[in-house]
Image (tube, rainbow, N blue to C red):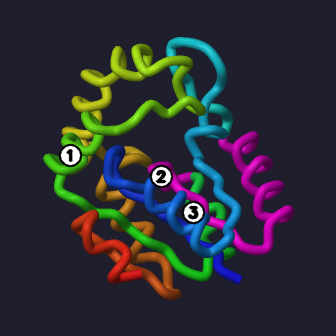
Amino acid sequence: MKKIIIFGNSGSGKSTLAKSLCETEQLAHLDLDTIAWLPGMPPQRKPLADSQVEIEAFVASHSSWVIEGCYSDLLEMVLPEASEIIFLNLPVALCIENAKARPWEPHKYESKEAQDANLDMLISWIADYETRQDTFSQAAHQALFDLYQGRKVMLSKNEKINEQI
């Protein structure tokens, strides 16, 4: 049973890798973006306890899975269940390039135009990855990676992902 956690900066390729692994390995997929936020604008985080209930329900209903996101606080909750973790620690410039090229994500935005309207804010947020000190930061992701004692991989290039996992 594979139970994989994928994390890293926005634009690092988490969703792309998760989808690929789910297809090739027949794994269930949980994108934490879908359970981390309350509906409405401006964006506001859901209480951690509410997200935890959804994570626990997902894990209980699937024997093999991929959970991906940039939320180290949520990922830490499921870390003891993981059989392996993958830290996509790509350079910020590459994450920005990936974000600019990403296709429409209909599970996050009602249209490609709505997604693109958010792009400037997203790029700014990605650019702050190395200096932020929050649950989404490189420091928080490195701490999560260091904490985990099982099989783990840190990748710094998208094209090497399939070769290293």
Q: How many marks?
A: 3
Query: Is the residue 19 above or below the residue 50 in the image?
Result: below
Residue sitting at the far front: 24
Please give the label number shown on residue 131. Answer: 1
Q: Nearer the viewer, residue 7 or 132?
A: 7
In the image, what residue type sits under mark 2?
Ser
Give percent across and percent down for residue 161: 34, 72
Q: Residue at x 63, y 38 (%)?
A: 34
Question: Is 148 contained in the magenta span?
Answer: no
The quadrant where residue 152 appears:
bottom left
Quarter holding the N terminus?
bottom right
Amino acid type shown at disc 3? Glu
Q: Nearer the viewer, residue 62 or 81?
A: 62
> Which SS type dominates the magenta stretch?
helix
Image quadrant where one finds the C terminus: bottom left
Describe the element under mark 3 as helix, strand or loop: helix
Span shown in magenta? 48-73
- Residue 15 numbered tag: 2
Q: Secondary structure at mark 1?
A: loop
Tell me which residue sits at (49%, 74%) in the image. Answer: 85
Q: Earlier in the sequence, mark 1 or mark 2?
A: 2
Is 133 left or right of 106, judged from the image as shown? left
- Distance from Cα at disc 1 to Cα at disc 2: 23 Å
**Residue shown at 20%/46% (left/top)?**
131
Assess disc 3: are there few (<14), some (14-19) or many (≥20) residues with their C-alpha within 10 Å of its C-alpha.
some
Image disc number at residue 98: none
- Name the front one of labels 1 and 2: 2
Residue 76's tag is: 3
Q: Nearer the viewer, residue 154 or 134?
A: 154
